[in-house]
Amino acid sequence: MDLGIEDKRALVMGGSYGMGNGIARALAAEGVHIYLTARSRDLLAEQAKNISKEFGVQVEFGTCDLLKSGELEAMLDDAYNKFGGIDIQFNNCGGPPRLLPSEANEKLWRDWFDVIVMAAIKATGCALPGMQKQGWGRVLTMTSSNIYNASVVNVLSSSLRMALVGWSKALCKEVAKDGITVNCLVPGRIYTERVKAGDEVRGKHLGISADEAREQMVKNAPMGRDGKIEEMGALAAFLCGMPAGYINGSVLRADGGRVGVNF
């Protein structure tokens, strides 16, 4: 299927590895030019070179630690100086520490609100004027399965990603008339370093090894396996494409049917 987005420009946050990188690759395969951002300059430089060589698109990059004041704004300035505008805004970030509600102090709440919620709002706010002017745009935000199954050991992610869903649904009603769609992605157990770390935490709580924790999760999965980064990328690319122009304000799962099953 031709998604009709060749030569569009995408800002992919958290794009150096994991699901963000997989989504950057899926967009690049459709001819989208990519601006990658994450914390590691070395990883970004390597991935920018590899993606550009593999797919023949322009790939730029800039480092950004969302916990450090001013770095988000500096990265956005660089992206817009290099690309002139952004057609596809993909909001994504690393996950917060896995904590019980009683373990999360006020500083952690404030810091991770800025990382998970405000970074997405600020980055999208920069992209919207250009999207509105041209009458087309895509805003896609990564959330978490915790918006459905609030994890007792992951209260920061559960709560703050729910806030992203509320913001996205409100924003889509404001900008839909401008040809802009605003949607959220919900990954299930897509096998990434983050999921591996979650297995370690879960194993400690259960008194078993990380491998045993993963085996339990896979055994209880409706499809009997974890998801693949490429499967998440395919969904994201479709939602950014022309054929998905009437999908708006939605929260779309790629979880193998796991909702309703404890994560």
Image (cartoon, rainbow, N blue to C red):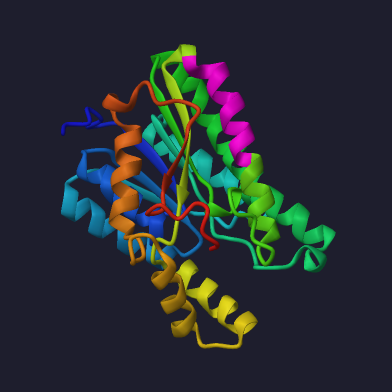
Work out whether residue 42 or residue 101 is closer to the camera in this orientation and state it.
101
- Please report the residue visible at 17 percent of the width from the left and 54 percent of the height from the top: 54
Across and down, in percent, residue 201 comes to 59, 77
Question: Can you see residue 67?
Answer: no
Determine if the magenta segment contains residue 219: no
Work out whether residue 102 or residue 192 is closer to the camera in this orientation and state it.
102
Q: Which secondary structure dominates the residues rendered in magenta?
A: helix
- Please report the residue visible at 44 percent of the width from the left and 63 percent of the height from the top: 41
* 2 shown above or below 19: above
* 191 shown above or below 184: below
- Please report the residue visible at 25 percent of the width from the left and 30 percent of the height from the top: 5
Say whether residue 138 is left or right of residue 7: right
Image label count:
0
- The residues colored magenta run 164-176
Across and down, in percent, residue 34 comes to 33, 44
Work out whether residue 121 or residue 253 is closer to the camera in this orientation and state it.
253
Across and down, in percent, residue 136 comes to 38, 19
* 190 shown above or below 141: below
Q: Quadrant of residue 79?
A: top left
- Please report the residue visible at 70 percent of the width from the left and 59 percent of the height from the top: 155
Question: Can you see residue 9?
Answer: yes
